[in-house]
Amino acid sequence: MTEAMFRFTLAGIIGLAIPAILRAQSAAPSAAPPDTTPKITFGGFVDTYYAYDFNKPPLFDRAFTTQPARSNEFNANLAFLEAKLDAPRIRGRFALQAGTSVQANYFNEPRVGVISGPSLSQLIQEAVVGVKLANNLWVDGGIFFSHIGEEYWISRDNPTYTRSIVADFTPYYQSGVKLTWQATPKLTAQLDVVNGWQIISENNTGKSAGIRIDYASKPNLVFSYYNFLGDEVPVTPVPITVPTVGGLRFFNGVGVKGNLTEKWLLLAEFDYGIQGRTGLTTANWYGGTLIGRYQATSAVAIIGRVERFDDPDQVLILTGLPDPFNVNGASLGVDVTPASRVLWRSEVRGFHGKHAVFPKDFSGPSKDDAFVVTSFALTF
């Protein structure tokens, strides 16, 4: 995002925030009461797994998904410890993490300068502080979960164990500042100014912005719109002399998530993005997923998914080959809750692509890939 566009976006954010602040202050007492009920809680989560990829990747690393990241191996997908503070006018969360999904997802953290890169960034799940500016209006700053998408970083919070391709190739985390406004009991709006597309360390001189709007038509059924606008050209030590993907990125997504009935949960998402390219025409991509979860008993759920992702210009998904990523997928899973705070999840998932882009043992790439995974997770 250019400096002029950044100033324009920041002015828009301030312009939207000021009326809400003034309205709230006019109705509120002149002196806010002190915080008398701060609550500090501690917790954690451990997700262990075993996965087997039928393409038998020679170095055990699976391609294109952050979980499961390894094949034919027992390992920790995600483990974290957290501390949270909640009070009437302040809030915050600090969480440290580790696991193979962390290594996979933070692999591309920018390495610009000496004090940069994933060595520290990947350990910080969130480090965010927030202050209540007015009734129903908060400002938060630091490292926090992304405003994009319908699936979350923590595996237990998603209807499927593995995350959809549209989730794995949009940000799970951001670094910056955000305003969250509960406009009505049904409508929430969020405005973000961040370093860039899933980065903590900065990789250029610009900043990016995005919004998210959630409308709860029912208490457990939410419709969402989210977007992102920013310059995705990283700084380089020498001028770029060949055409590359990189420039102003404009991304939009819509989704719905919630309970259709007491037993059925639905998640649907569709994303579309465009991006300028140095010396070339505009690139674009799209992706979508549809997930249904049926709670068969109090302890057992069955989950199905279909999905598609098409990135013809290799903007988000670099295959390492001339052919791009144009893939359909499906999965079937079973969740069992054998005891409180314990979750056992198993899933089989397959992909079929237009091109041979999936690594396969030592015989070369394949159009198809499939794997099975089982996980035990504990929340404490």
Image: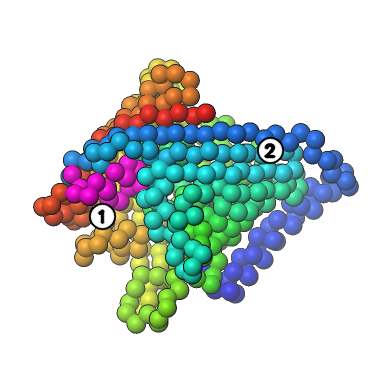
Dot placed on the residue nearer the N-terminal end, 1 or 2: 2
Q: At x 35% / y 47%, what residue is drawn? A: 66
Q: In this view, does 159 lie to the left or right of 367?
A: right
**Residue 304 showing in the rendered view:** no
Q: At x 52% / y 44%, what residue is drawn? A: 96
Q: What residue type is labelled 1?
A: Asn
**Residue 263 showing in the rendered view:** yes
Q: Is residue 37 left or right of residue 243?
A: right
Q: How far apart are marks 1 and 2 (CA)?
A: 44 Å
Q: Label 1: few (<14), some or many (≥20) within 10 Å?
A: many
Q: In this view, does 220 lie above or below 364?
A: above
Q: Label 2: few (<14), some or many (≥20) within 10 Å?
A: some
- Residue 104 percent across, percent down from the top left: 37, 50
| Residue, disc 2 | 86
Q: At x 41% / y 34%, what residue is drawn? A: 47
Task: Select label 1 or label 2 by which is in front.
Answer: 2
Stretch in magenta: 56-70
* Extreme-left residue of the structure: 363
- Residue 357 percent across, percent down from the top left: 21, 55
| Residue, disc 1 | 326
Q: Is residue 303 left or right of residue 231?
A: left
Is 290 inside the magenta-drawn segment? Answer: no
- Residue 172 percent across, percent down from the top left: 47, 49
Q: Do the residues labelled 1 and 2 touch (CB within 8 Å)?
A: no
The residue tagged with tag 1: helix, strand or loop?
strand
- The chief SS type of the magenta part is loop
Q: At x 89% / y 47%, what residue is drawn? A: 30
Is 64 inside the magenta-drawn segment? Answer: yes
